[in-house]
Image: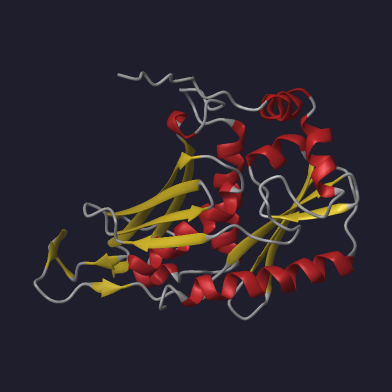
Amino acid sequence: MSSTEITPSVKPAFTFEAENFRKIQPKEFVRKFLAQNIRPDGRVFRQFRKTTINLGQIKTAEGSAVVRIGSTTVVCGIKAEVAEPKTNSSTDGYLVPNVELSPICSPKVKPGPPNELAQVMSENLNKLLKSAAVLSLDDLCIEEGKAVWVLYADVVCINYDGNVFDASVIAMLAALSNVRLPQVEYQDGIVMATETRPIKLKLSRLPFSTTFAFFDGLYLLADPNETEESIIEDVITIACDETGQLCNIWKTGGSSCSQEQIKYNLGFGFLHGIPLIGSLGV
């Protein structure tokens, strides 16, 4: 009887050399790809990763969405509670956004209080929702001066591979479009739900953001992944609405950005975002 000799598979030496090169000299590793007009993950400079949106994934929430940009995955769940309105705005409810980078999303995120990145993203998301006037807060009124809805919108990143803010904006908008509030009645200080059809929120504007990273002052990279983010200091995020109107701009790093570049990125981001907004059916 003949015997078969089994030899363990061995990866080619160049595979290990490339991986070591990436870890030891990450900037030079990326630079060699960009010099050939390609990025390490195979994308061209202004190519976005595939984005998917799934609505209504959390059954215990009033509205929810799961968004994936490449491997980056975020979940947004919106819970509604009843509260008293502010004295100076007796008909306005509340929209309270929060972004969390959970420890399971990346080895770089440690358990404990929210890190600086999560706090900055929460603040920027709140600014965008207010500046774009996504939702008319008086639509959340139950009884003037007595009771309003509070919407707690929590975005949790469960897998981090770069560009979490863009994913968070899409997830927030998608979850808001998915919210269904019960019809309620206010009687003698008590809010009671009725059996009638739930109410869908009216979204006044539909903002979305697109992020670009500058590398070496020569290359403009759309939708940077985690590897690219780790070696790039200059990033610009442009938010616009479904009509192409500018809502906000955030810029980090010391390099300058011309008006022509901003207009180009705005137009390019608009073309990318419109199909995503259209998929929500708002």
| Residue 66 higher or lower than 269, as above or below | above
| Residue 153 visible in the picture | no
Give percent across and percent down for residue 55. Answer: 34, 63
Residue at 58 percent across and 55 percent down: it is: 166
Is there any visible trace of residue 276 in the rendered image? Answer: yes
**Image: 17 above or below 180:** above
Name the residue rendered at 42%, 64% in the picture.
174
Residue drawn at (34%, 66%) of the image = 178
What percent of the width, then of the height, locates residue 23? 71, 25
Residue 81 x, y percent position in the rendering: 27, 53
Left or right of 219 in this view: 71: left
How many marks do you count on the picture? Answer: 0
User: At x 8% / y 72%, what residue is drawn?
Assistant: 195
- Image-based side of 167 in relation to 40, left or right: left
What quarter of the picture does the C terminus occupy?
Answer: bottom left
Q: Quadrant of residue 231?
A: top right
Instruction: In the displayed orientation, state which residue is furthest to the left.
Output: 195
Residue 92, percent from left and from top = 41, 65
